[in-house]
Image (cartoon, rainbow, N blue to C red):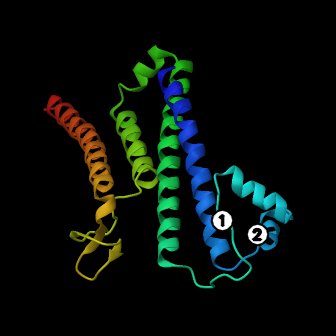
Amino acid sequence: MTESLSALRMMPWAREAVDQAERVLIESVMDSGWTWEQLGAFYGERSKQAMQQHYKRRGGQRSWPASRRQEPDPSDVESVRRAITGLLLNFRATDEALTRTMADASWNERDPEKEARRLLSWTERLNDSMDGLNDFINNRISQVPRVDRPLVLGERNEVHPDHLEIERGIADDVRAELDRVLERLQEHRDTVDGTIDELRRRRAELG
């Protein structure tokens, strides 16, 4: 129940993140020279008025004159990047909460005694830990760089030949995610170490 309530609490944040990201992306496309009619066709045969209403329902307040610049301003590109990053982070957090909720529901359907017997097997415990770590690495990490180079704070996120430049504005988010990664790896390491100790005991019992 606690996990379900946590997931429900995250839904307004997820919706807000989606609306914000879509609003910024629409503004970026319109700034590049598109018309409401073109955008409506891209969305699926929507009229100019329908697209304008769609934009306003997502908090949009801007308007565009007939003559607009063709090249996006760097600040627009940065706004789009931030919107997408925020959207992905919210999706990942929501997905993680929903995953825990489904796992909790699945647990409630299991026979506790059968599950306890299953976890007596070191192979089951190790498989559970490896599956969880694989999911974490591939689906729960968005900020931590995946290239093994020194990290240097700078003005943007960019790969250099001898280091990775990390934007100062997201440094706290990267630190927090690194802490999560280290914690998750330590959990897996504890499982592996426990398995090694157990197998050594079994080996010693055979003389």
Q: Which residue is mark 2?
A: 39
| Image quadrant where residue 26 sits | bottom right
* Local secondary structure at mark 1: helix
Q: Nearer the viewer, residue 76 or 91?
A: 76
Vertical comparison of 86 with 207: above or below = below
Please tell me which residue is depicted at 80% across the width and 66% down the height of the picture: 40
Density class for disc 2 (Cα within 10 Å; few <14, some 14-19, many ≥20) is some
Q: Identity of the amino acid at label 1?
A: Ile
Q: Position of residue 36 (x, y in %)?
A: 77, 69
Q: Position of residue 174 (x, y in %)?
A: 31, 56
| Image quadrant where residue 64 sits | bottom right
Vertical comparison of 62 with 139: above or below = below
Please tell me which residue is depicted at 65% across the width and 72% down the height of the picture: 29
Q: Nearer the viewer, residue 64 or 3?
A: 64
* Local secondary structure at mark 2: helix
Quick check: 27 left or right of 157?
right
Q: How many marks?
A: 2
Q: Identity of the amino acid at label 2?
A: Leu
Q: Which residue is mark 1?
A: 26
Quick check: 147 left or right of 47?
left
Q: Position of residue 153 (x, y in %)?
A: 24, 68
User: What's the CA distance linking mark 1 and mark 2?
Assistant: 8 Å
Q: Which mark is residue 122?
A: none
Please tell me which residue is depicted at 78% across the width and 63% down the height of the picture: 43
- Asked if marks 1 and 2 touch (Cβ < 8 Å), the reply is yes
Which is more N-terminal, label 2 or label 1?
Answer: 1
Please tell me which residue is depicted at 35% across the width and 39% down the height of the picture: 126
Vertical comparison of 114 with 61: above or below = above
